[in-house]
Amino acid sequence: MSLACVPIAVNAVEEIPLALERARRAQVLGARLVEWRCDGLASCDGAFDAVMRLVREAPIPAIVTVRSEDEGGSCALAENERLALLARVARGPGAPRMVDVEHASLSSDLARSLMLAAAGPRDDAGEGDQPARIVGSTHDFDGRPADLTQRFEALQHDPLVSVAKLAWMARSVRDNLEAFELLGMRSKPTIALCMGEFGLMSRVLAPKFGGFLTFASDAEGTGTAPGQLSIRELRDLYRFGAVGPATRVFGVVGWPVAHSRSPAFHNARFAEKAYDGVYLPIPVPAAWEHFKATLGALVDHEKLDFAGASVTIPHKEHLVRFVAERGGTVDADAAWLGAANTLVVHPHGTADAQRLYATNTDMPAAVEVLSAALATRGVALAGARVAVFGAGGVARAVAGGLALAGATVVVFNRSRERAEALAAALGGRAREGGRTTRVIAGNDDHFRCNAPRCECFHALVNCTPLGMEGGPDPKGSPMPDDAFLDDATVVMDTVYAPKETPFLREARARGAVCVDGEAMFLRQAELQSELFLRRW
């Protein structure tokens, strides 16, 4: 069982009461260890007594760390003074459960003699009063260290080190898989964590791979390392206590994904159905090669139990290509669209043709939501005229689905060439009863029309990332200044964070009927969930 440890920085003696209160709150939230980060406190008068008070009054077992500047800390003491303080704390009465010492520091004779003395038997030790165990740690805030394997081996074979800790700044999601490989080779309790946006997987999945602990802040904004989750997120959003060796892993693949509500939706659904799964944000930069390498590594990892993914901007077209190149199954509509947003990995397939399945739940979700909104204005989707902004994966699903339902779709995009390419790919498909899909590329003239209603649009749909929280232009909107809008016009956004985008705000000000992105998000997520939860 992996432990959740909350690091709390204490820089002055007067901060101790608040620090202890934070530790008590962290215990209630599920922390089983507290790491007292005493970098600043170590330079204060009476530092030893202050540190021992923190240890003595902590509601849960403690690790004491006085981090050197070389490994991301802020301790101003000379190296021999810093190590002497740690050794004294480790051997003091009522010593903490552990002290963290950088393994590079333990290379000196002075450091080893100090820490060996601290770790040795004590004649005056009372019952249950034992010296602290040593966490030998190594950190790299710039990236994966070139000698990572050598560092791991040195920590595993050092008799002075009771717990090995390796932490580095992840360059990609694939770094997490290397952390899991290290945990699989451990010969003693080991912490292997990747820092930064790409490293979240290593923090949440520590229990799956036998990591000794993971670090989480007691509140948002109080973390002591890049990418550190809060203890509440770890417990409530990612269900850390339920993660184990058999847990199946899902995620949302995109760039960016920090804004995504998919982890909250799917993890809640897993909890509701008592399903042993966890769903994570999986950031993958935009290029095809990044997507191919990352998704391939996740799917192929023998012990990850990667079972599926939601795929969002800008990778929906990449997913179709990935599954097709691997010989998997792309369903008919996703193949026609050239875009998919859902990957299911069959756990028992012996080949990719049996394991990988891609579909698009955006398409039926968009049709259902927009049909319902148009019905409130007495308009049927079949025969309606709809403007779609964008030419990426979301636009493909929305335009394709609406066209198949009988609407005439006009695609507008910043690059007219892409709009024309999308229209050429989706237009003219045969329909039941002899109808064919009508998808055409638009231009500004479509919005200078003051003719009767038949020449205007019944609905406008934003399928670009403009206005998206954390996106390239959070204040942007594709709404043309001369768009014809009235209370019979439906305006829909596929962006759901924030709930009211600049696009919807402009539309509402002009009197249009507005449909926010949450409605489509929830419906497509429900359809994905049915696939993820299927008992294969």
Image: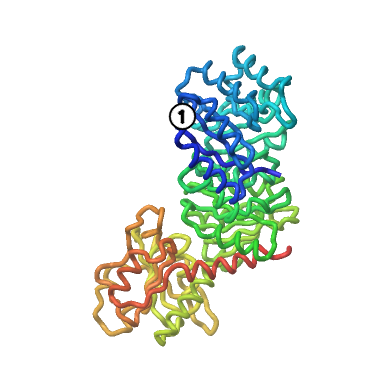
Image coordinates for residue 96, horizontal then vertical, percent: 63, 31
Identify the element where label 1 is drawn.
loop
- Looking at the picture, does residue 130 appear above or below residue 472? above
219 vs 308, left or right, is left
Task: Identify the residue position indicated by label 1 in the image.
Answer: 40
Report the residue at 44% width, 60% height from top.
392
Image coordinates for residue 59, horizontal then vertical, percent: 61, 42
Quarter of the image for the N terminus: give it.
top right
Front-most of 300 and 199? 199
Which quadrant of the view contains residue 294? Answer: top right
489 vs 54, left or right, is left
Image coordinates for residue 440, horizontal then vertical, percent: 39, 70
Image coordinates for residue 219, horizontal then vertical, percent: 50, 48
Report the residue at 35% width, 66% height from top.
412
Q: Could one spot residue 25 in this view of the protein?
A: yes
Tell me if mark 1 has few (under 14), some (14-19) or many (20+) residues whose alpha carbon lies within 10 angstroms of its own: many
Front-most of 526 and 2? 2
Which quadrant of the view contains residue 162? Answer: top right
113 vs 475, left or right, is right
